[in-house]
Image (cartoon, rainbow, N blue to C red):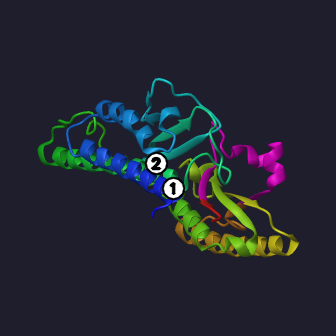
């Protein structure tokens, strides 16, 4: 017999799958404009979350905003960026309007962040494909004739500095032995997160740890190695010489509790740190 916990988990997975099915059905129409897509999306995104009745959503895309009727910023918030052609074009926010139950420091399930990331990724892919088609049509005919999702053509993006830094930040977080170093989470902040990094910009990483002295020394040495390697890579790419590319910011439970230093960026409403990985 399936116990109640397993049954509840299965029900949550069913809600997530139904949400993705609705999204696929919505995006099957190639002629929808952003208003139609996001107006429908804010309606059914909350249906995929655990506490549907207190779940609200807001979508910002290229300077415009769509939000559910009762949306407001709360401490219980998930965010995922919408990337179109590797450029941040907007974001999706999901908020709980009241506290029900916290588990492992969050009211959201880990699967719910994955769900939101998947939705944002598919939205970005949809607009990329539509704008690519529109660009090709313009090249063939010389006439731009598109709906809202093809109105803005793909633009050449010669500035790749933030992109490879972002990929390396993801790779570093994937390879880190978090248990060995006593790391609880790693976040991305600064110009790379905001897609504004230049050829001499640092890669700013925020590491939340509970390391002892030996672990902390090993952690710093590990990042120093990465920093020097990335500095050499940047030199080969741009000709800029730096003494190290990673700007490492370390925070502890005390910093988070007291709201010290960079700890305030975790879960912030404005310019929040982007979670790369959390310890299991």
Secondary structure state at the residue bearing disc 2: helix
Q: Quadrant of residue 74?
A: top right
Which residue: 56% across, 36% down?
Answer: 96
Write the residue at 45% across / 51% down.
12
Comparing 44 with 146, the one in front is 44
Q: Nearer the viewer, residue 167 or 65?
A: 65
Residue 210 screen position, x and y as percent: 80, 63
Q: Is residue 84 above or below residue 148?
A: below
Q: How many marks?
A: 2
In the image, taking residue 85 as reference, residue 116 lies left or right, namely right
Would residue 197 be seen by someone viewing this image from the given angle?
no
Q: Is residue 262 magenta?
A: yes
**Dot 1 crowding, Cα within 10 Å, few <14, some 14–19, many 20+:** few
**Above-or-below relation of 157 to 89:** below
Q: Which residue is mark 1?
A: 4
Task: Tell whether 208 sits left or right of 132.
Answer: right
Cα separation between marks 2 and 1: 26 Å
Q: Is residue 78 left or right of residue 29?
A: right
- The boundaries of the magenta stretch are 248-276
How far across and how far down the image is residue 242, in percent? Answer: 69, 65
Q: Position of residue 203 (x, y in %)?
A: 64, 59
Q: Which mark sits nearer the N-terminus, 2 or 1?
A: 1
Which of discs 2 and 1 lies nearer the camera? The answer is 1
Crowdedness near tag 2: few (<14), some (14–19) or many (≥20) residues, C-alpha within 10 Å? many
For this rendering, which residue is in front, 78 or 275? 78
The mark found on residue 116 in the picture is 2
Is residue 275 rendered magenta in the image? yes
Location of the N terminus by quadrant is bottom left
- The percent coordinates of residue 169 (x first, y second) are 59, 63
Proximity of marks 2 and 1: CB atoms separated by less than 8 Å = no
For this orientation, the residue located farthest to the front is 1
């Amino acid at each position: 017999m399936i116990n109640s916990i397993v049954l509840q988990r299965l029900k949550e997975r069913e809600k997530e799958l139904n949400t993705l099915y609705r999204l696929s059905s919505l995006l099957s129409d190639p002629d929808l404009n952003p208003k139609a897509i996001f107006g429908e999306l804010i309606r059914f995104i909350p249906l995929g979350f655990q506490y549907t009745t207190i779940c609200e959503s807001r979508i910002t895309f290229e300077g415009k905003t769509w939000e559910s009727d009762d949306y407001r910023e709360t401490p219980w918030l998930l965010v995922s960026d919408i990337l179109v052609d590797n450029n941040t074009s907007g974001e999706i926010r999901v908020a709980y309007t009241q506290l029900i139950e916290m588990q492992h420091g969050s009211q959201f399930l880990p699967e719910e962040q994955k769900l939101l990331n998947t939705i944002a990724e598919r939205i970005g892919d949809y607009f990329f494909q539509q704008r690519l088609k529109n660009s090709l049509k313009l090249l063939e005919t010389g006439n731009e004739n598109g709906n809202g999702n093809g109105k803005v053509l793909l633009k050449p993006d010669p500035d790749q500095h933030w992109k490879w830094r972002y990929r390396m930040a993801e790779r570093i977080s994937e390879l880190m032995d978090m248990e060995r170093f006593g790391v609880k989470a790693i976040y991305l902040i600064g110009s790379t997160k905001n897609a504004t990094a230049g050829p001499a910009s640092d890669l700013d990483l925020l590491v939340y740890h509970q390391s002892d002295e030996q672990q902390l020394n090993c952690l710093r040495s590990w990042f120093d190695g990465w920093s020097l390697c990335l500095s050499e890579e940047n030199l080969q790419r741009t000709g800029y010489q730096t003494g190290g590319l990673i700007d490492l910011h370390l925070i502890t439970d005390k910093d988070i509790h007291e709201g010290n230093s960079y700890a305030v960026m975790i879960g912030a409403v404005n310019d929040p740190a982007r979670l790369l990985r959390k310890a299991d």
